[in-house]
Image: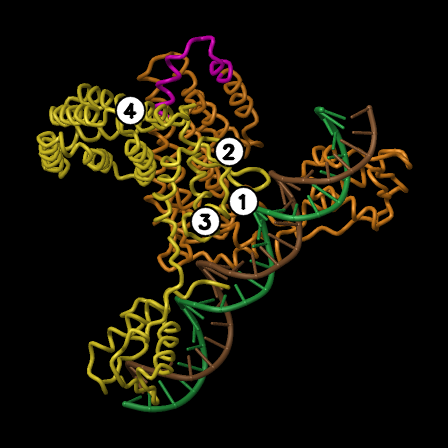
Chain colours: A yellow, B orange, C green, D brown
DNA sequence: CGTACGGTTTTTTATTATTAAAGACATAAA
DNA sequence: TTTATGTCTTTAATAATAAAAAACCGTACG
């Protein structure tokens, strides 16, 4: 009825393999050394050693920890049900919203969802609190949460914001010297795009990943944590939506690839106006795709 | 050992005043009506009514709720210790960071801080989780939190990002027709600035508030929730820092007012270049002020 | 016959209590 | 003197719990 003993269980099983890798009769290293090796505190190491002593795997005499026998399957302690941590939760949640086609305005039930996602209710609460900064969910006055994001307005404003950030990145890129790594990166990306174009009929699915990589590369020339943070939200939303919008996917992706290639060329020209124009053209297409995937998901407004 | 009964206590005291405002012998409205009026659920209303019955303030007979007597001070139930909610916490926390001059890298102790701020540990945890989206605090791998924001780099990147957003707002404003409310708003703001300039020697403190109002007005022409959300973070950080940077405050503020006035004039000219130049000039000054207040607080890097 | 009301039960949420883990300090052995 | 262990304190993650909300259902009154 308190925190899980996952650390203890993991340390225990790892300790078994450490023992098995050593001679019977050999001495285990110090508690501090073991703690460092297992990446846990000494408290956990001591609990594990005590358990192993109890199990007659080792014998503790004074400061000596003598290995007595090989481990068997029954020595293992069973693990508590695994709980996801807050980072793993992010993808799961957006997946659920889009897969289940959860309409905006839905009240989000922490108790129920925590079971569904196999996370602690507490973790979900924290996650919602952080999401509320981007307006994807909002806190109700008397407690509880409501899904707010993924409306048409939200998508429009997100797209606009994305354009603002990316146009800024573009204006940085065109001023960068030839020696900057971005140009090499763009060469690679150009190859990757051409590659995918050759096998587009089979692998058009792969574009979603390439799209994310491409935009991240563009925006990474600006070393700004706020740009990066928003970039994460943006790619989260766009990426997840595109994943569920299957209409015309092949054609859409082929077009987008060509736009990316034009975009790369325009950047290389170092002409600010044409680079920004190419960027805007592509981002406008992307916006339309996002809007149409909202319509496809039937709860567009 | 569960949630506080603040709602019950508040509903109870309000119900006492409702009873006192009515005749003795009169009947109280239905539970639903009372629930609506008090802004709580029927469950709370029923608990309150039961308590009042117990206290012989009213008598419940069938569906009738008869008022029996006037209330006395002893009828009131004592309130549980008040806990701040998450919104009130925000200001308190930043205040603490700046007032106590907490250096970046400090580990934040939830158990201890929750007592200091008189909030539930849980609430503080949620708050940190939401702050972590802006990198002000970060989560440590094995649990716990570290203060990260308010470094020199953070201030620089925040200022850059702010400039990016505000320059965008400026380019919107210069295209707006005369009929748009922003022009009226700017006229008002110009008056407020001139007013303050007249009494700058006494009231230079008031600039901080005016500064926030001014920039919010500028950025509100862009109807975008991300811009707005970020504007909140910006004014939070800038506002709180300026509050604690007392060096040259009078001179700084007077200069800033003049920059604001130039800025307003430039906007009115509808010339994009001069408007953006004025904006950049002021934002650069603001950035320097933020940086110098970090230095004044001794933990600038 | 319908509708408003109150009794009852079921969810759901916010907070406390509790246990796991981390860390600090003291002490003893090498 | 250094390094390892024993002991104690502090901190954090989760489960238990009470408060509040909401749903359900019967009943009385028009």
| Tag 3 and tag 1 share a subunit | no
Task: Using the image, determine if residue C3 lies above or below residue B156.
Answer: above
Q: CA distance from mark 4 to mark 3?
A: 32 Å
Q: Position of residue A181 (x, y in %)?
A: 13, 39
Which residue is tagged 2?
Answer: B208
For disc 4, the neighbor class at 10 Å (few under 14, some 14 to 19, many from 20) is some
The residue segment tinted magenta is B166-186
> From the viewer's perspective, is the residue at label 4 or at label 1 nearer?
4
Which residue is tagged 4?
Answer: A289
Residue B1 in which image quadrant: bottom right
| Tag 1 and tag 2 share a subunit | yes
Q: CA distance from mark 4 to mark 1?
A: 37 Å
Residue at point 38%, 80% (across, down): A50
> From the viewer's perspective, is the residue at label 2 or at label 4 nearer?
4
Mark 4 or mark 3: whose residue is earlier in sequence? 3
Residues at circles 4 and 3 in contact by the CB criterion of under 8 Å: no
Secondary-structure class at tag 1: helix
Q: Which mark is residue B86?
A: 1
Residues at circles 1 and 2 in contact by the CB criterion of under 8 Å: no
Q: Position of residue B75 (x, y in %)?
A: 83, 49
Which residue is tagged 3?
Answer: A114
For the residue pair B235 and A185, the one nearer the viewer reads as A185
Task: Using the image, determine if residue A9 lies above or below residue A184.
Answer: below
For disc 1, the neighbor class at 10 Å (few under 14, some 14 to 19, many from 20) is some
Residues at circles 3 and 2 in contact by the CB criterion of under 8 Å: no
Q: Tell me the subunit letter for badge 2.
A: B
Secondary-structure class at tag 4: helix
For the residue pair A216 and B46, the one nearer the viewer reads as B46
Residue at point 20%, 34% (across, down): A205
For the residue pair A30 and B3, the one nearer the viewer reads as B3
For disc 2, the neighbor class at 10 Å (few under 14, some 14 to 19, many from 20) is some
């Amino acid at each position: 009825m308190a925190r899980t003993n996952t650390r203890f269980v993991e340390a225990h099983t790892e300790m078994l393999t450490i023992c098995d890798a050593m001679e019977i009769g050999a001495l285990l290293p110090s508690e501090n050394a073991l703690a460092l090796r297992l990446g846990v505190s000494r408290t956990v190491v001591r609990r594990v050693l005590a358990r192993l002593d109890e199990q007659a795997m080792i014998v503790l005499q004074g400061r000596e920890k003598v290995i007595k026998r090989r481990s068997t399957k029954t020595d293992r302690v069973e693990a508590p049900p695994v709980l996801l941590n807050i980072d793993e939760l992010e993808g799961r949640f957006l997946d659920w919203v889009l897969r289940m086609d959860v309409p905006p305005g839905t009240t989000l039930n922490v108790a129920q969802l925590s079971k569904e996602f196999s996370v602690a209710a507490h973790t979900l609460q924290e996650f919602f609190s952080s999401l509320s900064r981007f307006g994807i969910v909002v806190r109700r006055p008397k407690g509880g949460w409501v899904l707010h994001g993924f409306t048409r307005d939200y998508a429009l404003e997100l797209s606009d914001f994305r354009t603002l950030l990316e146009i800024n990145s573009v204006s940085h890129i065109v001023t960068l010297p030839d020696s900057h790594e971005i140009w090499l990166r763009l060469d690679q990306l150009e190859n990757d795009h051409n590659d995918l174009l050759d096998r587009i009929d089979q692998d058009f699915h792969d574009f979603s990943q390439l799209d994310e990589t491409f935009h991240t590369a563009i925006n990474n020339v600006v070393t700004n944590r706020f740009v990066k943070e928003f970039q994460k939200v943006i790619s989260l939303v766009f990426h997840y939506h595109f994943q569920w919008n299957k209409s015309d996917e092949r054609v859409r992706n082929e077009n987008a690839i060509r736009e990316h290639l034009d975009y790369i060329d325009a950047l290389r020209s170092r002409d600010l106006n044409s680079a920004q124009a190419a960027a805007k053209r592509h981002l406008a297409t992307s916006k339309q795709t996002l809007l149409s995937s909202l319509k496809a998901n039937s709860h567009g407004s």
